[in-house]
Structures are given as structure tokens and as C-alpha cells.
Amino acid sequence: MINWANRLSAAIVAIAIGTSASAQAADWNEVVKAAKAEGKVTLYSGHVGVPYHPEVAKMFEAKYGIPVEILDLRASDLAERVRTEKATGRVSADVILNGAGALWLLKNQEALAPYGELPALGKLRGDLELDGTRLPIYIQGYGIAVNTKLVPEKDRPKSWKDLLDPKWQGKILSDDMRALGGGSTMFATTYAKFGREFHEKLAAQKPQFSRSVRENARRVARGEFPIYIPFSLPDQLLNKGLPIVGITPIEGDVYAQFDLALTNNAPHPNAARLLMDFFLSDEAQLVYVRSARVPTVKGLDDKIPADVKDIVKAKLLGTSNPATINADLKLATEIYK
Amino acid sequence: MAMQALSIGATARGNLRLGRLGRLAAPLVLVVILAALTVYPIGTLLYGSLSTRPPGETGTFDLSGYAALFNLRTLGILATTATISLVKTVLSLVLAVLLAWAVSRTDIPGKTMLELLIGLPFFIPPILTAMGWAMLGNPTAGSINQVWQALTGASWPLVNVYSYGGVVWHMMQFTVPFAFILLIEAFRAMDPSLEESSRTCGAGVLRTFRTITLALMLPAISSVAILSVIGGIEAFESPLFFGVPAGIHVVTTEIYDSINNRATPNYQYAAALSFAIVLLMALMVAWQWRLLRGRSFQTVSGKAFAPRPVALGAWRWPVFAFCVANVVVFTCLPVLQLVVSSFSRYYGFYSVDMLTLSHYRDVLHSDLFWRSASNTARLGFIGATLTMILGSIIAYVVVRTRLPLRHLIDLIAWLPWMMPGMVLGLGFLWGFALLPHSIGIYGTLWALLLAYMSLGTPLGVRTMSTAFMQLSYDLEESSRVHGASWLRTFGKIVLALTLPSFSVGWVLTFFMIFRELSASILLYSVGNEVLPVTVLRLWEEGKAEDVSAVAVMMLIVVLVFRGLHLLIVNRWVAAK
């Protein structure tokens, strides 16, 4: 419970440092103080079912004493909720964690605010594109999941194009390519690399769409389907001991960059920026490295555990282009009726 | 104000005269309350079906949403929806009537336990039973098929829940107990003297059942049938779990798809499709009114009777076995599956080294779980109580008075049944978004409470209407003739005789809230989560075993709650 003195202090700080993010960053200590006065921060995450950002949130709470409320929603559901909150002027989310493309759409809808200066910005790798609104947090590779009992090693697909083999007709489970998420990222990337014909043939394989991405891997493990695409390769760690294996195709993994963003009119803007900055700390980034994701800050290469190195260092095919995301979704809807 | 409404209602038959203004004021108040709960969100939804922009944004208006309905695909979806709903209603009612009759009117053993167990699946949120059946009837990994293949060596599955049959089957999972619970009360309220007369005149058990029992039960059966058909059209979890994977689409999954699984949500199409359903529902209600018009349903009279069970003779044990089989299939199998899964590291992989308590530990240490449980309990108790009070007042005014506007009140109270919960939730979302910021309902528990009251009112009204319809006017008139005031008459006669129905309605409403998902998913916000939403979130996060643990805990609550309720009702009946 925030007492009135704290509220007053927060108000004074907010007035003193202004409402724009850059002004708030003038003195980071003031931001920390204001964040504590705000008392909490709400994170909406489009990366559902993974234990990592709750773990980072606990670390943040332990360090600053500010609790983080997390709402996990699928990427497109999250985008719609943020849109509704914005349209009705009742914003609950402070920070959004989602794929770069989904956040690009929200940015265009003016649902996001610039994050301004953050102390940890200098740690970011130089090869990342920054736009002042989306803050890259980690990169995740997607490949093909196979049930090891149903598919002997010699028969397993080794290339994305192996999925077009008639023997897989009706046997492929897929994240829905017509909505935001891993499925749409895979669609956009492989469409750009392999052309429309690849997807027309893949559609003829009659893949079964399902958006319960974590459950889908289990369905493959249980033998309901021999193949699942696109499989978040780090999820192998969540399915240890089950008859499922992730394959990096010879062309490389499709990848998605996950970013953080500050919402426009966030109820707790200082706590939000403090949390965003914390996600770039070594301790937070190592949580993602240990989970087989690629960090976005420099200097952690020698800290990648041996058992996940293959996944973290896998060859990458590409990712979706945020600028064409709506057109790609439309194409997917057209091909996969 | 509510009591005033009742008082005025009663005087219509009690020969007390109030001014014209008074006779109009009370129903007007009801109309205003109902309008806020039903007409307002439906009005905002109508607005949405014409608006080219999503909720919260101002757009232009056109009919493109309705134009999109007229194609073979959408018409096919409408036909599939209606067919599935009708088939599951017929099958469920046949089962439910037989079960309710056997448990309430025959001499089979273990009736109290059977009543508890047969009704039990209704109280389990459909998403949980859907999970149970997905684990049981999956063609490749389902427990039933694994056992079947191990026993017979067959390579083909015995059952496949991903089919039309699977959708119907899972709908029956909660329709049979739902109909059973409503019908058993009606059976109990029925005067058995007519059946006894039939038997005395030489008719057999079956003929009496067919010509007397069923005829007397027609109002209750037709009401339940209508509710079941509507429920089937509104059902979401069954087609989502078992229809969509098989390429079977119904109205609710189409609405869900067009809002959630499109690059840009198509609210206009979803709202227009919903209004097509409203039209279908309106036709059904009109048909029900036509069916019941002019009939007298007074089967509870002042005449004393002691319900004597029908002696089944040689059929006693086969009928008992039929009831037990029902319990095993509908209750034990999915519950057992959920229990096993809750103790397994990964469901579908069963071995001793996979046993764990970690899912219970995870759930019990989750702030989200406790917050959701607390919110659900508060909303359940308050929502069910307010809904049943409102439903009773409406039913009384409609059934037992000649007050003006009573037909309008009946119609408005029915409106939420004509809207799938998801769409009504959308209407409320839109409605709350349009309210001035000073009315802070959006994103609070109030939003959920109002939605639940709206969704529950038709059930409350229907439950109490049936009770009031079967109550002879003689009883009230006798009381009044003997000098009792209206209030005393109402308390000692009307309320006392309909208390079992009230309590049944309360329990049904409580558990409607307990399991409501489709409206909640649109109206909850961070901090205001309810259990079904949390369950869905856990499911979507791939934590099916945690959901099983939650299911087991919810099931224990259901068992305790339902057991206590039956105990109280039975004692109350015995005391009378």
C-alpha cells in the first residue's frame, strides 16, 4: 500500500522531471525513487508459458522492492487488449514484452511511448536496430519438433522443404500462421526465402493449426502428431525426458526478437523504465541465456552453458519484417483458408 | 422497491387496490434494472455490428458485417451449430428424464448418492471435463484407446473425441446433469396421485410414465429443452477442444476466431453473426411460448400427498445399474483422469517415476491462484444471491400478477440467453468503455458481477417461473381468506413452497459464475482474475498438469458444496 507521503513524493518527482521519458532519465536516482513511490509495475507478456520473465520479475522485486504483476496473453490477444485499453483511456499495462513485429504494430497505433535514456543502453550489442521505443531483450530460434518414437532418425525432416514430402500430409501440427506469433514469423520468413509455392505446397499438406504453443509440443510428445512447426527450440529444456526433439533445419532457424516497450500513459512510468533497464542487466540476461536464448547485451558469450550452446549458436535463416507484417498475415490467411 | 413490486403484484389477485401510478411504477423499476443489465450491452453490440471500428473507437456505419453472413461457409456453420445442439438436446433429455424419474420416483437403492453423483459433472467447469475427455478419448494417446489397444491388440482407436460425436458427447457431459438437476425438482413437485390413479385403472409403469408423467412434465421438459438448445448454441469449450481440431466450426468458435485468430479482429462480423443467433433464439422463445400457451401447470396443490416410489420389481437392479453406468462414464472417468494427471509429471506419460506433488505445490504457492479463487468465491456468492432475488421478483411478477409491462419484463429478462456469453461480454466491454470515466466499472470486479447477473437472470427467472407456475393459487387465496397479510402469505406459502427451487437456482447460478469463461475472458483485468480465466491461462501456457491440480481442488469444493446443499434441502423436505 502506498502511503500519501509516497504518493506526494511521486507526484512531486513526476512534476519535477516532467512526463517525457527523456526528462525522467535526467537523474536515474530520481527515477528509482519515483519508481519505488509508484509501488508496482504491470508487465503484459506475449511470450506465454515460460518461467523466465517471472524469474526476472522476482529478481527485480528482490532488488527494488517493487512487485511486478504479469499478464501472459498470446501475441495477438495482447495487442487487442492494449488497443482496447488505449481506446477507452484505461491503460493498465506499464511494460509490454512481445515479438518485435507485434510491438511495431502497437507503436504505429501510438500505444507505445519512447523509453528515453536508460543506464544499461550502452550494453546492447551494436548489431541490433534501435528505434527508441522497442528495447531488444533476447532472440529465440524456431525449428521443427519431431516425436522420436514415431519418426526414426533417418526419416526426420532435415530441411524446411522436407515438410512438403507427401508422407507428412495431415501429420503436421502448426502454430497458426494467420495470427501474430511464432507461426506468422515462420510464415513471413519462409515466404520471403522460399516463395509462395513453398506455402501453397505446405497448405496442401493440410497442417493442423493450434495456438496453444506450449501444449502443442506435448501433443507431439504424446504422439498425436509426429511433427510440430515452428518449435521454439529452447522449449526442449521444458520437455526434458519426453520423446520429442527439436531440429535446426539445414537452411537455419527462423528467429524472433523479443522486445520490451513502455506503454503510452503507463500508470507507473518510472517503475516501468526501471524494469526495462533491469532486463538488460547481466543477471536478467543470464536467465535467458541459460534458457537457450540469445542475449542482446555484450560480453556474455563465455557464460553460455555447454548444454544449450548448440541452440544459442545455431545457424539463423531470418525473421519477419515488421513493415510487412500486416501484408504477410493477409497472405497467410489467403493461402491457409 | 423490490418488495413494493411484489406487494403490488400480489394485490392484483388479492383485491387490494392501488393507484394506477403505483401499478406502473414497480414494473417500470424492474424494466430499468433489466434494461441496464441486458438491453444496454445488447444495444452497444448492435452499435458494434454496424460500426466499422472496434470497441472504444468511433467509426462510420455500414452493413458489411451482415453482408458477410450470406455465404455458404457461414450458413454451413449455422446449420452445424443448430444440428449439434438439437442432437445433443434430444440425447441428453432422453437420458436425463429417465435418470431423474428413476432417482426421484422409483425404489432403486442409493438414490441420495446417485443424485449427488449424476448432477456432479454439471458443476465442473467444461474446460476441465474437456481436458479430461481429451486425455481419455484422444485417438492416439487417449487412455481409453491405450487400454483398448493393449487389451485387444487392435491398431485402430475405439473412440475419437475429435469429431462431431466428440463435440456432442462433451456437450452431453454437462447437459445431462443440468437437465437432471432441473427435472428432478419438477418430478418431486409433481402430484403423484395422477400416476397412482393411472396405475389403479390398470395402466402399466411404462404407459403411466408415457401418458401421465411425461404429459405433466411437459412444461419443465420443454423449458429444459429450450435451455439446452440455447446452451448448445452458446457452448464454447466443446467445439473449441473437439470440433476445431477436426475442422468442425460452430458459431461460437467462428466468433472467437474472428476476434482472436485474425490479423485484425473482425468485431463487426462477429457482432453481426451474433445477431443472427439472436434471431434464431427469438424464434425459439416464441415457439416455446406458443407451445405452452393455454396450458395449466398447477401440479403442486394444497392436497396432501406422500410421494410413494414406483416399485420396479425385476427392473429395480437393471435401472440402478443404468444409473451407476451413467455415473461411471460421465463422472468417474474424466475425474479419475484429472486426478491421475494432477499427480503425473507429464500427463499421457504414466509411470511410478513420473509421480509428483509438484503441481499442487506450484498451484498452492501461486498468488494468481489464490487471488482468482477469492475473486470467484466473492463473485459467486454475491452474484448468485442478487441474481436469484432479481429472478424471483421477475418470475413472480410475470407468472402470478397481471401487472402492466410484465410481458415486456419477461422478454427483456430472456435477452441474455439469446447472446453467447462471449458476445454479451463484448457488449459489456463496449458498454463500459462508453461510460464516462467517473463511472469506473471497466476493469473492476463490478464489470464481472454485472455481466454474471445478466447472464444468470434468465436461469433464475426460468427456475422460479417453473416453481411459481406449479403453485396453485388456492394456497395463497386460502391464506388470504384466513386473514393472513400478503407479506405473511408470501413468506409462509409462496417462498416456503418454492424455496427448493430458489436454492437449486442459487446453486446453478453460483456454479454458472464458478465456471463462466467466455464473458470473463473479455472483462477481467490484472488483479481481477477469476478461476476459469486462470485455468485457461495455465492451459494456454501448457501447464495442463497444474490445471488438473486446480481441477481436483475445484472438484473437492464442488463435492462439499453440493453435498451440503442436498443435505439442507433434504432436511428441509423431511421437516415439512
Image (tube, coloured by chain):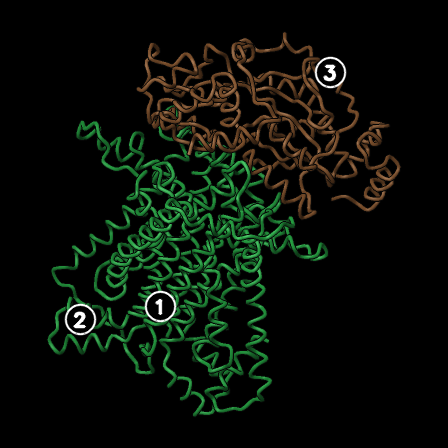
**Which quadrant of the view contains residue A239?**
top left
| Residue picked out by circle 2 | B208
From the viewer's perspective, tell me whether residue B549 is left or right of residue B146: right
Picture layout, residue B392 above or below residue A256: below
Colour brown belongs to chain: A
Q: Is residue B192 visible?
A: yes
Q: Quadrant of the N terminus of chain A?
A: top right
Number of residues whose C-alpha sits closer than 10 Å to that of mark 1, classed few (under 14), some (14–19) or many (20 or more): some
From the viewer's perspective, tell me whether residue B276 is left or right of residue A124: left
| Disc on res. B226 | none
* Residue occupying image coordinates x 60% and y 22%: A257
> Which chain hosts label 2?
B
Q: Secondary structure at mark 1?
A: helix
| Residue picked out by circle 1 | B288
* Residue occupying image coordinates x 52% and y 10%: A310
| Residue picked out by circle 3 | A123
Please provide percent x and percent y for residue B400: 44, 79
Q: Please tell me how many numbered marks the rendered image carries.
A: 3
The span from disc 3 to disc 2 (Cα, nearest Å) is 85 Å
* Residue occupying image coordinates x 32% and y 64%: B183
Residue B525 or residue B324, whichever sits in front: B525
